[in-house]
Amino acid sequence: MESLLDRHVLVLNRLWQAVNVCSVRRAFTLLYQEHAQVVWRDGQNNYLTHDFQGWHDFSQKSPDTESMVHAVRFNIRVPTVIVLLAFDRLPSKEVKFTRQNVYERDNHTCQYCARKLDRQDLNLDHVLPRQRGGQTSWENVVCSCISCNTRKGNRLPHEAKMVLLKEPKRPRWRPFIHLTYSAPVHDTWRHFVDVGCWNVELGD
């Protein structure tokens, strides 16, 4: 069973842009050290902030029995969003070029036959073959099934009478978090995060 302290908390920078996800344990540390404040949405959809003491006091007035951490001398609610008080940067804007990220960009879909497949049934294809000077880059590599990859061989798509679904491009970076774990996303995150968007660096 997941510990309350291991739950995920969305981290915003000073400009209220999503930059990370941390554990509740880490969030409490940042709050106590006065590096962050809790972001709370009230019943009128207003977003309010609380420092550690303010969040403690709010927890006593509005307890949530399912999301309370029990300390020695007090109980305190688990935050779902925190905002950093000094950090205003965004993560690096470069999306790593990896096999898995190409699969993600192309939605695990063969760019020739349009079939969506599991990873083990997918491969990477160089649109302009490497033997003919093609580079291993976002603009020249696409997701393909094994049979289409074999059929195309060292030819250009039109030479093999094949057509790409779309032109391969470098993914456009967006300052949002891409969630890959199976835990449900807290409703308060949706104001700050487009769950379907790219992470700055997707998993290998």
Image (tube, rainbow, N blue to C red):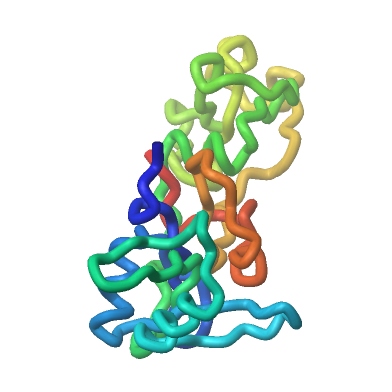
Q: Residue at x 62, y 55 (%)?
A: 195
Q: Is residue 190 above or below residue 147?
A: below
Which residue ends up furthest to the front in the rendered image?
73
How many marks are shown on the rendered structure?
Answer: 0
Q: Nearer the viewer, residue 171 or 202?
A: 202
Residue 158, image x and y in percent?
Answer: 73, 26
Residue 123, image x and y in percent?
Answer: 51, 22
Q: Is residue 85 above or below residue 108?
A: below
Q: Quadrant of the N terminus?
A: top left
Left or right position of 150 against 31: right
Q: Nearer the viewer, residue 74 or 49?
A: 74
Q: Residue at x 39, y 53 (%)?
A: 4
Left or right position of 149 against 87: right
Left or right position of 6 against 127: left
Q: Residue at x 73, y 41 (%)?
A: 166
Q: Residue at x 42, y 88 (%)?
A: 54
Residue 25, image x and y in percent?
Answer: 30, 62
Residue 56, image x and y in percent?
Answer: 40, 80
Q: Quadrant of the C terminus?
A: top left
Q: Is residue 199 above or below residue 137?
A: below
Q: Nearer the viewer, residue 69 or 156?
A: 69
Q: Nearer the viewer, residue 51 or 68?
A: 68
Q: Is residue 42 above or below residue 25?
A: below
